[in-house]
Image (spheres, helix red, strand yellow):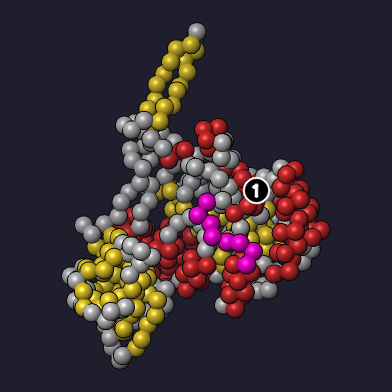
Amino acid sequence: MVKNRKKIELLAPAGNILKMKTAIAYGADAVYLGIPDFSLRVRINDFNLKTLKEAIKMTHEHKKRVYVTVNIFAHNKHLEKIKPYLKELNNIKPDALIVSDPGLISLIKRLCPKIDIHLSTQANCTNYEAVKFWQKQGVKRIILGREVTLKEIKEINKHCPKMELEYFVHGAMCMSYSGRCFLSKDFVGRSANLGDCVQPCRWEYDVFIKAKGHEDILELVEEEHGTYLLNSKDLCLIRHVGDLIKAGVSSLKIEGRAKSIYYLANIVAMYKKAINDPKKADFLYKELLNKVTHRGYTNGFLLEDKAEQNTSDSHFISDWEFCGQVISVKKNGNPNILKIKVHNTIKVGDLVEIVLPEYSIIKFNVKKIIDFKSGNEILEAHGGGGGQEIVLEVKSKFNIPELAVLRRKIK
């Protein structure tokens, strides 16, 4: 297992093997992942025991760390199923397990004694006395609740200097305290706390006030024309990376196991750049505003403000569209010969940007597209049917790595 923890860690989500590879290619120091049954991600999660073992092996070959999420709030029915799973995890040796349930922590200490335990943000750890308690239980890292402020992080680090602290810096925010939401369970019978949330907070509602006796009742009704009353803006702390590091955070965490490889590549690249060059933070924030789909951005609770809602629309649509990912690169002097798997559409004449690690950008206009299968020149390519494969020639002084993502200007 990889144990070097001296530098600041950038921790990225991985919903499948390709996302994991993309995160590593773009500079993530560690990834977190898990199988659907026990990881708070039942949907859009492609991992099973076989691919989990493969992911851990590949991550360690790249000298990166991998943390497995086992962070459901378990019921009795889960305990017998989870025991053989923990025994398998003990054999394949991830660097840590992310856990929220005290009972599961007890099981892990017995069945996986050599694997570190990280306390999930779901456990709502928000003060230094709680950190001390979990430290006595053998927890090696606390993933602080999103409600913890910068001032409180400093205080926690002061009182518990030997505890590793992890904090979310980017991604979706839940409208409930540390994700402890019951709307999905109530509306459609799918529990957020078992990883099956349908995100009713993102739905559009009409709001009615009904009188009942001497009390007014607020009633939410899902309608075609209403308001996004519960729709939290996305967390974005790229301008506060330096503040978090000074406060004692050792791992900066990106949310989004269900997000696309395009999202993952951009966010990892930008935050890696912000860690290594804090002066670029304002530029990177503007890029996040314009180049990635989001719900509007908020600092969350970090600066002791109230987290903000986006009540006007579902999300912002970028002027740029994800259009491809590099499968292979062949040097022919200059230009580079790129084999591309198309996502959405690429057309001759499009203005395209290739996003590189640490957020360097190659910009060019598409002059010629070759269909890889037929070898014929074509005017446009599409992402349907698993993604058409094409060849592009790109002149650049930069090395273009495999798995680099491309976007095209659409407005």
Front residue (pair 68, 246): 68
Q: Position of residue 398 (x, y in %)?
A: 34, 81
**Residue 46 is a magenta residue:** yes
The single residue placed furthest to the bottom in the displayed view is 333
Apparent side of residue 402 relative to residue 156 in the rendered image (left or right): left
- Residue shown at the point (55%, 32%) measured from the top left: 186
- Residue shown at the point (34%, 88%) measured from the top left: 331
- Residue shown at the point (43%, 26%) measured from the top left: 220
Which quarter of the figure has residue 337? Answer: bottom left
For the N terminus, which image quadrant?
A: bottom right
Mark 1: amino acid: Ile
The single residue placed furthest to the top in the displayed view is 213
Quick one: label 1, few (<14), some, or many (20+) residues within 10 Å? Answer: many
For the record, the magenta segment spans 43-50
The single residue placed furthest to the front in the displayed view is 374
Which quarter of the figure has residue 143? Answer: bottom right
Apparent side of residue 177 relative to residue 286 in the rendered image (left or right): right
Front residue (pair 392, 309): 392
Apparent side of residue 288 relative to residue 11 in the rendered image (left or right): left
**Residue 82 is a magenta residue:** no
Front residue (pair 350, 29): 350
Q: Position of residue 323 (x, y in %)?
A: 31, 65
What secondary structure is the stretch in magenta mostly built from?
loop
> Is residue 283 visible in the rendered structure shown here?
no
Which quarter of the figure has residue 202? Answer: top left
For the C terminus, which image quadrant?
A: bottom left
Q: Position of residue 290 (x, y in %)?
A: 31, 57
Return the residue at label 1: 72
Q: Secondary structure at mark 1?
A: loop
Is 173 situated above or below 242? above
The single residue placed furthest to the right in the displayed view is 110
